[in-house]
Image: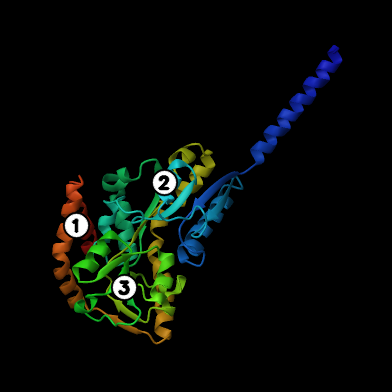
Amino acid sequence: MNIIKIKIFITVIASLLALSSQVSAQSPLKLKLAHFLPTGNGLHSDFMEPWARELESCSSGTVEVEIFPGGTQLGNPTKLYDAVRSGAVDIANGLSGMPGGRFERSRIAELPFVFKNADEASRSLWKLFPDYLQDEYPGVKMLALYSSNPGQVHTTKKSVTNINDMSGLRLRFPTAATASMIKALGGDPVGLPPGNVYENAEKGVIDGAVFTWDTMDSFNLAEVMKYHLDAKTYVATFWFGINQASYDKMPENVKACIDQSTGDVLVAKFGNWWNKWDKAGYDLANSAGHEITVLSDEQRANWLEKLQPMIDNYLANLENKGISNAREIYTKMKEISNAN
């Protein structure tokens, strides 16, 4: 090979490498976001879908976000945290109580009658996160902790209007604290993923479920749940996080887009969102002529008094597991609630 051919060869190789580098630079960073909910649920349609598209827009096409909702291989609610921690997905939104045994400090918020609404609970969780809750989420950068509005007791055939009516009912529970509450009131707690509640209620396997109003719409439960006790007994807690290693490797502009759309900014949105979602479920049940009973403040105080031994036992069990500040966290949550 003469000198001229060598120079031509080198020029061609250099051009190909430059072109390859340019194509690579233009290729978007593809992120996987997984959650456990149907696409008709507000957490998908109002929160995660718009958030993903806004991230793409903010990054000027630097990233593409593909969402894997409930029902897909990556949407298993019991595996979401492990999936995002291992990097099988980049971002995930999960329910703190699935699987059980994790996020015990965060789930203290789920004890009966701690919070009055989703906004109050969500801001409280995020406020306590740096000092009390952060260590529960290794390997994952939390983008938000948040809560549902307080939930209700929904039943298929039997009306629940007071504390004694809970006795003997087989009720799907959303959290460990709610399971303890049902048992303390004489009911039989049944563990089921949200997507399996309709079928089991329709078949009579369960008598009802402790759930938020929004599920009457997003999971079509108003078709099988005809009686509703608006007791506002509990909240369910959720986490939204990104794999820490994935985040650390991202371009600075993408990190900035994520940072400015999460944390305090995102947590502040869940109150209004949940009010909207709950209204849709409530309106559906109300327009269908379902029986809806609302507990008075006095009745709720009676329920709380009845449940106090269960609450004390729940906190004692956490202390026995090594969470020595469980009562301190509970007290701080109650203080935040009472201050609002």
**Which label was assigned to residue 152?**
3
Q: How far apart in space, not on screen, are marks 2 and 1 (Cα)?
A: 26 Å
* Amino acid type for the residue under numbered disc 2: Asp
Residue drawn at (54%, 51%) of the image: 55
Q: What element carries label 2?
A: helix
Going by the image, does 180 lie left or right of 259? left
Residue drawn at (41%, 48%) of the image: 81
* Rendering quarter of residue 11: top right
Q: How far apart in space, not on screen, are marks 3 and 2 (Cα)?
A: 30 Å
* Amino acid type for the residue under numbered disc 3: Gln
Give the mark nearer the N terminus: 3 vs 2: 2
Q: Quadrant of the N terminus?
A: top right
**Which label was assigned to residue 314?**
1
- Count of marks placed on residues: 3
Q: Percent position (x, y) of residue 236?
A: 33, 62
Q: In which quarter of the image is the C terminus?
A: bottom left
**Which label was assigned to residue 229?**
none
- Residue marked by disc 2: 82
Q: Height in image: 270 above or below 138?
A: below
Circles 2 and 1: CB atoms closer than 8 Å: no
Going by the image, does 257 lie left or right of 3? left
Q: Which residue lies furthest to the top in this view?
A: 2
Local crowd size for mark 1, using a 10 Å CA cut-off: few (<14), some (14–19), many (≥20): many
Q: Percent position (x, y) of residue 67?
A: 54, 55
Q: What element carries label 1?
A: helix
* Amino acid type for the residue under numbered disc 1: Tyr
Q: How far apart in space, not on screen, are marks 3 and 1 (Cα)?
A: 21 Å
Residue drawn at (31%, 64%) of the image: 235
